[in-house]
Each structure stands twice: as structure tokens, then as C-alpha cells.
Image (tube, rainbow, N blue to C red):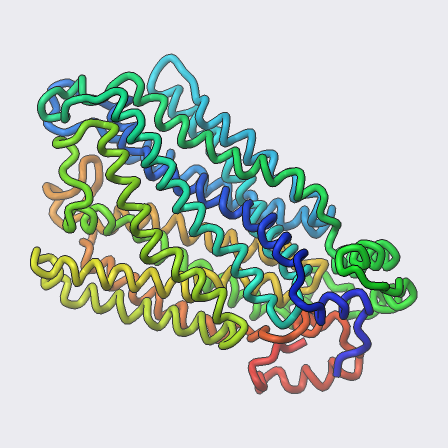
Amino acid sequence: MAGDQLQVLNALDVAKTQWYHFTAIIIAGMGFFTDAYDLFCISLVTKLLGRIYYHVDGSEKPGTLPPNVSAAVNGVAFCGTLAGQLFFGWLGDKMGRKRVYGMTLMLMVICSVASGLSFGHNTKSVMATLCFFRFWLGFGIGGDYPLSATIMSEYANKKTRGAFIAAVFAMQGFGILAGGLFAIIVSASFKARFDAPAYEFDPVGSTVPQADFVWRIILMVGALPAGLTYYWRMKMPETARYTALVAKDAKQAASDMAKVLQVEIEAEQQKVEQMSRKPANSFGLFSKEFLRRHGLHLLGTTSTWFLLDIAFYSQNLFQKDIFSAIGWIPSSKTMNALEEVYRIARAQTLIALCSTVPGYWFTVFFIDKIGRFAIQLMGFFFMTVFMFALAIPYDHWTHRDHRFGFVAMYSLTFFFANFGPNATTFVVPAEIFPARLRSTCHGISAASGKLGAMVGAFGFLYLAQNKDKAKTDAGYPAGIGVRNSLLVLGVVNFLGMIFTFLVPESKGRSLEEMSGENEDENAEEVELEQQSGYNNRKVPV
């Protein structure tokens, strides 16, 4: 049975939904809006970069980024994000959530602007400069994952905590949507002002010199939402859970939350000191005690996020086939450079509007009703079903008459990724670990996901190439083919479903109840006896 809860933490747990909750969602969510804009907008301009910097005289097709350059430009931000998740996750537990939160935002603002100002006398130096700033942009974005999730979980009440954290993550959908819409506006404006013939009629003239401004403007605008949020982030008080349980300053925690909640809260310094002396509140990340209490939970959160992101980021494999199949993007040689940017942005925006955004918000509405575990299990199940349904009769889907069926199945796969593990893998690590390790463990889980994203985005790009070397994309070796790649992804999703059983249900329970931070020593022994039975899917402590 749980011991007495600190009054300040109990006040947060039972607080009715108030304006400060929505303020916190917007402040933390705008970070994710920016993250999504910055990470996904590069895919809108890679074709343009190929036309501008890798044009080959006499070629039948417009210039494209070589495989190694494409992997670097698209993937370097992922590498930075992975490093940032680990570093800022750890730093958030050492220095406090609020102090580190401002650092990540400023890094994102500076590097978004610098990415658009990438300079150099030749193609190599422009690409190298772009990759350098994209890495550090990713580093700042990485910090936003553990910090936003942890701050929102520590501010929320226990009744609607899942919806609040999921709403922060759902702002990603709006970021992707905003990136597509802004690219449509910029490319359409430049196209109207600087019209040009299609590549097949005039290879050089199809890419007007002013096109070089388009990709730079699109990348630089990512700094705006982050910059506008900075002031409000700095005004947010430190979370009471960090101040009381990690910094052990009960007076400051009570004072901060009294202003936020507009109620009188007693500072219980003596109780904080008593809690800090309990064995349950002193073990470290690399201790046997952590392994015993939370080892399986960390394995569950890291493995499910890793497996989910392999499948989620593999979607690039099929987008070009889908877009061309339904006529959204014709052959590149039939368009000029700005027309191609416009078409790609329009297609990405429609996908976000019809599949990505609805999935995120379904999770927000249902996560505190049916629980994290059920949503994650359901999501992985349907992703497995739809991947196998695409893979087994793959030849059937390749016929033009059946292409719209393929698009529908593809859309449903990613709808259930977002109304499923893509949201829950972000929510759960912010709820089940102790306050002093919460940001670190979320950062580790998120970094595992980004490792999966790299496997999905780049490993499968090579793996899905045709078995016949003569039919592969330019510069790529032979692979196992799209059908076999889909079968592998089906197995990946099935494994995600299996590893979900390691993740405890946290619906309706306080953070301290989940982590065992306010457990009595006698209660610990009782809970440990129940651990093997995993009763009612409650977290063992």
C-alpha cells in the first residue's frame, strides 16, 4: 500500500483540468510542432537540391542526390537527434527540466536559420555545411523529446495525463502539415513569378536560379515557432516533482504550484527528507535495484519504440510508388524544379491530413479511456495485419486497377501507427520511472527509437531494391525486393506486439505509484511477491 503522498504532488494529481494545463500543452507542443517541421521538411526539398547541385548535362532525367549524399542530408539530423535525446535526457535529471528546456529551443532556432544559410564555393561545401547544421539542429530536437514528455507528465493530473502527453506529441502532425502547406505557398509563389519550361524541353532552364532561395526559405522558417515559444518556456516554473523529489526543496515546489493552481499548499520539507532516505528513492540507473525494479520496463519501452520506428520510417519506400500511381506526382522530367517541389509538398500534405493527423488525435481522445497497453497492442496488431496483407499478394497490388486498394491499405497501416505505438511509446516512458531518472530513461527509450528510424529509413532503402542489379535505383546495390521487405516489416510489427507485454499500464495511476517513490518498505515486499504474477498489469516495485 502506498505511503502518504506529498500534498503538492497530490494537488497536481487531483487538480481539475485548468487553463495552465492547456498552456503547458501549447508551450511543450510548439516544440514538437517545430521538431516535426524541421525533421520532415528536408524530404520536401531533396529533389530540388539534386536538380540545383547535381545536374548532369545531357542526362534524360533531372539531377538527383547521390545515395551517400542523400543518406547524409536526410539522416544526419537523425544522428543528432539520437545524441540529443541521450544527452539532454540525462541533463534534464541533473540540472532540472526548465533550465535545459531553453537550451534545446535556442539550439533549434540558431541551427534552423543556419541550415538555410548553408554556404560554399562548390557543391561539396554546401552539402557539408548543410549536414553540419542539420546535425546540431537534430541535437536540439532530440532534447525536446524527453524534456517535453517529462514536463507534461509532471504537470498533468492523473485522470487525463495520457491525453495531455499525447496532445503534445500530436502537435507533430500539425508540424508536418505546416511544412507541406508552407512549401506549397513558397513554391507556388516562385513558380508564378519565375515560370520555367519542363526538364524534357529545356534541362538547364527548367531550374531557375531563384529556386536556390526556395529550399533555404523553407528550412529557415522552422526557427519561427521555436523562437516565439522561447519566452513562455522561460516563464514556466520548474516542475514540482523535480523540485521536491530531486532537488528536495519542498518550500519552492509548494510556492511554485500554489501560484499555478491558485490554492494554498503546505511545504512539507521534513516529509521530503524522510522520503529521500528511503532505499526506493536512492538507487541509480546502473544499479541492481534499478534492474530489478525497472529493467524489464526499460527493455519494453526501448524495444517497442525501436521496432515501431523501423516500420514507421520505412514508409519512404512506398511513397514514390503511391504518389505516381494515383497521379499526384508525374515523371520528374515532365516538370520544372518548382513544379516538382509543389507536387511533392501537396502529396505529403494530403497524406498528413488524411492519415497522420487523425491517428494522433484518436490516441488523444481514447488513451485515458482504453489505456496505453490496449492502444499499443491494437496498433501493432493492425500494422502487422496490413503489412502482411500488402506483402503476401504484392503482385496483385502492382496492377494499375488495384493501386487505390494499395493506397488505402498503406494509409490504414500508418493510421494505426499513430493511433497506436507511435504515440504510446512516447507517453509511457514519461510515466513509469522515478523522477530522478525519468528524463534519462525517456531519452534512452527515444534514442532507441531513432536508431530504429535510421534502420527503417536507410536500411530498408537498400534492402527494398530490386533483386536484379540492372533494375535498381541509380547507385544502389541489389536488394531483396519490396515484397520481401514488406514481409520483414510484418515480422517487425509482430515482435513489437510481443514486446508490448513488458510495458505496464499506467492509466489512472499517479507517477509515484507507478515508480514506487512513495512506497512504504513493508508494502515493497508485498508488491515484490506479486511481481512474478504481474497482477492486473500493475508495475512491480
In the picture, the quarter occupied by the N terminus is bottom right
**Residue 285 can be seen, yes or no:** no
User: Residue 233's spot in the image, x, y percent?
Assistant: 66, 44
Q: Position of residue 237 (x, y in %)?
A: 75, 49
* Residue at the (51%, 35%) spot, across then down: 137
Q: Is residue 360 above or below residue 506?
A: above
**Residue in the foreground of this view, choosing between 201 and 66:** 201
- Residue at point 56% right, 43% down? 84
Q: Give the residue drawn at x 40%, y 31%.
A: 218
Closest to the observer: 299 or 400? 400
Q: How many marks?
A: 0
Q: Quadrant of the C terminus?
A: bottom right
Instruction: Tell me which corner region of the image, top left, top right, bottom left or bottom right, holds residue 63.
Output: top left
Compare residues 107 and 467 and report the one nearer the observer.
107
Task: Identify whether 335 is placed above or below 324.
Answer: above
**Horizontal placement of 475 versus 375: left or right?**
left
The structure residue drawn at horizontal position 62% and vertical position 51%, both measured from the top left corner, is 147
Residue 26 image point, x, y percent? 58, 50
Q: Can the viewer see residue 457 in this picture?
A: yes
Query: Residue furthest toward the top?
Result: 121
Vertical arrangement, residue 336 with respect to residue 489, above or below: above
Residue 459 percent coordinates (x, y): 32, 49
Q: Along the horizontal axis of the image, is 323 left or right of 99?
A: left
- Residue 308, located in which quarter of the rendered image? bottom left
